[in-house]
Image (tube, helix red, strand yellow):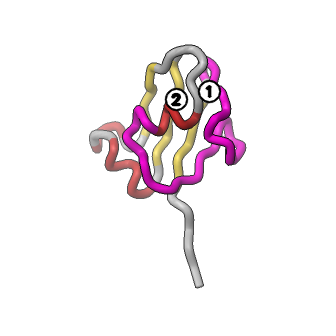
Amino acid sequence: MQIKVVLFSVFRDKLPPEKRGRTTIELPEGATVRDALEKLDIHIHAIVAVNGEIERDWDTLLKEGDEIRVFRPIGGG
C-alpha cells in the first residue's frame, strides 16, 4: 500500500532536498505507524499525525492512502 509522508524540521534530511520533505512510501498491508518510521530511518523521538490527527499509538494500523506527518517535539523552559 502507498502512504503519503510529510517530514518537518530535522526529519526533512531523511529525503533528498528536491523532495522538500514530501514523499510516498510503499508498505505491506497491515503496516503500522512504527513500520513507516522504521522505513524512513526515524529512530528518535517524534510527534506523528495520521490524516491530520496526532497519533500517540505507533502500533496503529495504516491503510492505503493515509498521510503521516512527522514533527520534532518542541521543548521550552
Q: Nearer the viewer, residue 71 or 28?
A: 28
The region drawn magenta spans 38-65
Tag 2 secondary structure: strand
Compare marks 2 and 1 and give the one earlier in the sequence: 2
Residue 51 found in image quarter: top right
From the viewer's perspective, tell me whether residue 59 is left or right of residue 35. Answer: right
Outermost residue, front direction?
A: 59
Structural crowding at the residue carrying mark 1, measured as other residues with C-alpha within 10 Å and reported as few (<14), some (14–19) or many (≥20):
some
> Vertically, is 21 above or below 66?
below
The structure residue drawn at horizontal position 56% and vertical position 43%, both measured from the top left corner, is 69
> Vertically, is 64 above or below 41?
above
Q: Which mark is residue 4?
A: 2
The structure residue drawn at horizontal position 52% and vertical position 47%, both measured from the top left corner, is 70
Structural crowding at the residue carrying mark 2, measured as other residues with C-alpha within 10 Å and reported as few (<14), some (14–19) or many (≥20):
some
Q: Was residue 57 drawn as part of the magenta stretch in this picture?
A: yes
Amino acid type, mark 1 = Asp
Main SS, magenta residues: loop
Q: Nearer the viewer, residue 64 or 18?
A: 64
Q: Position of residue 52 (x, y in %)?
A: 68, 41
Q: Position of residue 24 (x, y in %)?
A: 45, 26
Q: Which mark is residue 66?
A: 1
- Determine the CA span between mark 2 and mark 1: 6 Å
Amino acid type, mark 2 = Lys
The structure residue drawn at horizontal position 52% and vertical position 29%, both measured from the top left corner, is 4
